[in-house]
Amino acid sequence: MKKIAFYGRNIPDDFKSSMTIMLQWIKSNKLETYVYHSFFESLHQLGFTEEMKVKSTFTGHQDMPKGLDAVFCIGGDGTFLEAVSLVKDAGIPLIGINSGRLGFLANITIDELPTALDLIQEGEFVIEERSLLQLKSDQFSFPGYDSALNEFTVYKRDSSSMISIKTSINGVYLNTYWADGLIISTPTGSTAYSLSVGGPILAPDSNVFVLSPIAPHNMTVRPLVVSNESEITLIVESRSGNCMVSLDHHSCTIDSGIELHIRKADYKINMIRLKNQNFYNTLRQKLMWGADKRN
């Protein structure tokens, strides 16, 4: 790697020593470095920016440097998802450095960081492509980024009555869900919100979506797996006259009766995975499968 960028929110106290390790790595490999503007301010306050020798900062997708080898996302999975909406369809590989808690996207821990940086510079990594879903509607435009790496969610605004979600797959009527909401998840998002409502865990390279209802009125309604070549159409009705929709960490309010179309995006996100990592090991470690915690 020769040209990298950093994205993050802030530096937790227990990550400062790790940031010093990263600075030493940048210096020893003479890397050309760019930093997201607000993250630069956080680093500057901690005295890191002078040693980084940052070439320039950027504020969004429109002024991201060309020819980046990778964007390092410092934080948790939420920070990683923000970086996805920053990179969009540019094809720049993302790598997540976990400075927080449980992370499936930001999966390089503080303890693993020194070894991981060396492996990255030695080329001991692969680039994985992850599919996204995209929201379209003729009746409204989602503010900002209209795609999601994890999930699309429609849900009621408050503690009011359930909403009804008329759902069709490729123009064929499936069901009208009476529920608090509905999650449509990618394979990457199957270990996120969808998992918490009983959705299945999917391998990241699966070519499917999962429809997972949130607190459905009918207990026989279960999560459903469909091809990601499908177009899913939703019409939501609510007594309050509106509801919420979200794409990963972005959300907005929409009126009842608006027709929503969810389909696979026409591009993918590139993620860097170390060769000594794999999804199944990560799954076992993060979810503590096989661990005996009785004592």
Image (spheres, helix red, strand yellow):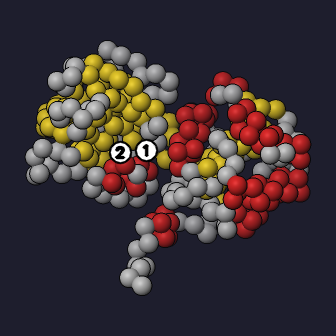
Pointer 1 local density, CA inside 10 Å: few below 14, some 14–19, many at least 20: many
Q: Secondary structure at mark 1?
A: loop
Q: Position of residue 243 (x, y in %)?
A: 28, 27
C-alpha distance separating marks 2 and 1? 6 Å
Residue indicated by mark 2: 185
Tell me which amino acid carries mark 1: Asn
The quarter of the rendered structure image containing the C terminus is bottom left
Up/down of 103 relative to 254, above or below: below
Tell me which amino acid carries mark 2: Ser
Left or right of residue 111: residue 241? left
Q: Position of residue 229 (x, y in %)?
A: 33, 39
Residue at (51, 59) in percent of width and height: 102
Left or right of residue 79: residue 135? left
Q: Position of residue 162 (x, y in %)?
A: 17, 35
Residue at (30, 42) in percent of width and height: 183
| Front position in the image: 26 or 66 | 26
| Front position in the image: 252 or 72 | 252
